[in-house]
Image: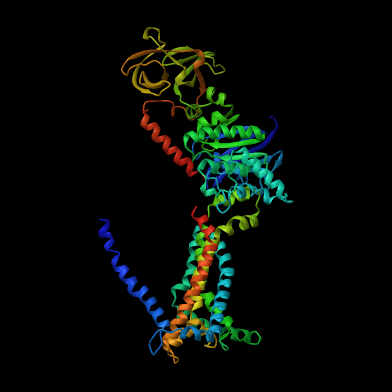
Amino acid sequence: MSKELIRLSDCTMAFDDEIVLDNLNLYIKDEEFLTLLGPSGCGKTTTLRIIGGFLVPTKGDVFFDGVRINDVPPHKRKVNTVFQKYALVPHLNVYDNVAFGLRLVKPKIDKKEIDQRVREMLEVVSLKGFEHRAVSSLSGGQQQRVAIARALVNRPKVLLLDEPLGALDLRLRKDMQQELKRIQQQMGITFIYVTHDQEEALAMSDTVVVMNEGIIQQIGSPEDIYNEPKNAFVADFIGESNIVDGIMRADGVVEIFGKKFECLDSGFEKDEPVDVVIRPEDVDIVDTRAGQLIGLVTSVTFKGMNYDIIVDFKGFKWLIQTSDFCPAGSKIGIHIVPDGFHVMKKSKYSGLYGDYSSYSDEYEELSDADEAEEGSEDEK
Amino acid sequence: MKNRLRLLAYPYILWMALFVVAPIVIVVIYAFGSAGGGFTFDNFSRMGTYLPVFIRSFKLAFEATVFCILLGYPLAYILSKESSRSQGILVLLVLLPMWMNFLLRTYAWMSLLENTGLINKLLTLIGLSPVKMINTPGAIILGMVYNYLPFMVLPIYSVISKLDYSLIEAAQDLGASSAGVFRRVIFPLSLPGVLSGITMVFVPSVSTFVISQLLGGGKYMLLGDLIELEFLGSAYNPYLGSAVALVMMIVVIIMLLIMNRFGEGEEQAVMI
């Protein structure tokens, strides 16, 4: 688990004059489940294609097990890919699709072994009995399983997955997430997974790499990324965040809205301007008299497990998740424990995210649909 | 609304009835008729005499088709690999000869291939002895290939250029070299294009009469020539001509049916 397997060193990728990856440095450990996460156009697919051998970086080196592999073509790499649109060979049946790679191995593998390995792999992806079905007769989820079996049957050291669940419906996607995690652990190999879906990334990964504009924003475990986002972009992209301007008065003391709060962060200059993240679930609603801050509820949405309420604090709107019903128009007090604050250095993303002034459910759904569509379009 | 739109189809139905169905019926009636009137199989029993013409026609058309595949497939493949801008220009170049009059194109080949034609003049000029080219089966095949090659190139090109590129990447990813990718993915998936190319080259080749007359000098009678002779020539016998045309049509249809059955799987493949 600890050995380094792949290293991207100062990789820059430019198409014509457009820089898609900017001086990327990343190493991937053996047997880990690593996710490249970011909005479309962030360079995550490009990174994956560089590892797969379909793109050669304009600048920088790619190492596999310590050996530079910039010029090694895809068919000679110990890496296999599961493509976004499955890319199954349409004139071959399920069995022949899975056997495709094995039949190309030199020296030739004998028929018996091919047969055994294909059947074994179809069992791993729960497609036993589908051997002679035409791939066109399978559902999206089944086709994806064939694509995974086909990629794994060659026993690669690394499996690359390019938004493999993007075309599946929500329910199936959840099931497949579990499946993929199980397969990864069963096979004991490295998975590099590309997605724009943060929930998917948090649920499956050992390591998450958040990317934006061709630059890695943060690398860390799902917990790190969620609890200790490095900047406003990461805080906003992973989960919901209220991000407000603050000033670090001393170690453990942060000032927002002109009031000092106790926090757990330290290591900032005295009076350094900072971004402060408060997750919607970390805010306790209390009586106005006991509140650290007092705000006006402007809208309430029932979400099943909780209410999403938008609260106006001196013109700045927060999203708060609570199980207590607070009618719109009521005044509430809030209390935040020191652990509820997360202080970040100012970055170029400061002020761009974390305000819920324009928040509405419809808006959220619309933008989600857009994103899904862009995602399937794929960044080149 | 739907019914009123259907009215628009009537002129076409009328047209097809008059100019497609009726002529075929007339040909069939003629094929079983004679100058004396009455129903007869005579025209078919006399067909044996023309067996060599049938064989020659199908043989030359077959050879021309094979050449068209050999020339056209690589061309179509290379075309599809070019950048989209040069693809446009190259496709135009493939199409360009088709916009020139068919007779003119064939006449041009006559003057190139003649015993004292351009090619032989050049050969003599560099000290080689002239070669007999015109009025040979080779010249006829050349004429067929030249005239019908675009019909082979275009369908193959359109199938290959529409192939999902991720399929090719997937094959590479699974360990296929360039040759492997071609053999296992590109070629099998391009077969429907080849099949429709074969149809579009073979059918006009087997029934041509202009090419064989101009480039074969009338020495190699093809089915087209035979039919022309029976209808317009000295041997005037439209009954026999119709019978020949009918037999040719049936043979071609049977061949195409067999071929399409053979290619069924691939056609489905392309629709995915």
Q: Residue furthest top?
A: A289
User: Left or right: A53 with respect to B1?
Assistant: right
Q: Is residue A273 above or below residue A100?
A: above
- Number of labels in the image equals 0
Tell me the quarter of the image containing the N terminus of chain B.
Answer: bottom left
State the residue in front, B246 or A244.
Answer: B246
B243 up-or-down from A71: above or below: below
Q: Please provide percent x and percent y for residue B28.
A: 41, 78
Q: Is residue B101 above or below residue B236?
A: above
Using the image as rendered, state which of residue B39 and residue A287 is in the foreground: B39
Asked whether the viewer can see residue B60, the reply is: yes
| Left or right placement of residue A49 versus residue A237 in this view | right
Quarter of the image holding residue A155? top right
Q: Nearer the viewer, residue A234 or A222?
A: A222
> At x 53% / y 52%, what residue is drawn?
B164
A320 relative position to B139: left or right? left
Q: Residue at x 62, y 36 (%)?
A: A191
* Residue positioned most to the front: B39
Instruction: Note whether B171 is above or below B135 in the view shown.
Output: above
Instruction: Tell me residue A206's x, y (percent).
Output: 60, 29
Q: Is residue A323 left or right of residue A89?
A: left
Q: In this view, which residue lies farthest toward the right?
A: A107
Percent x, y for residue A265? Answer: 54, 16
Q: Residue at x 56, y 42 (%)?
A: A46
Q: Is residue A210 visible?
A: no
Q: Quadrant of residue A312?
A: top left
What is the x, y in percent for residue B119? 58, 83
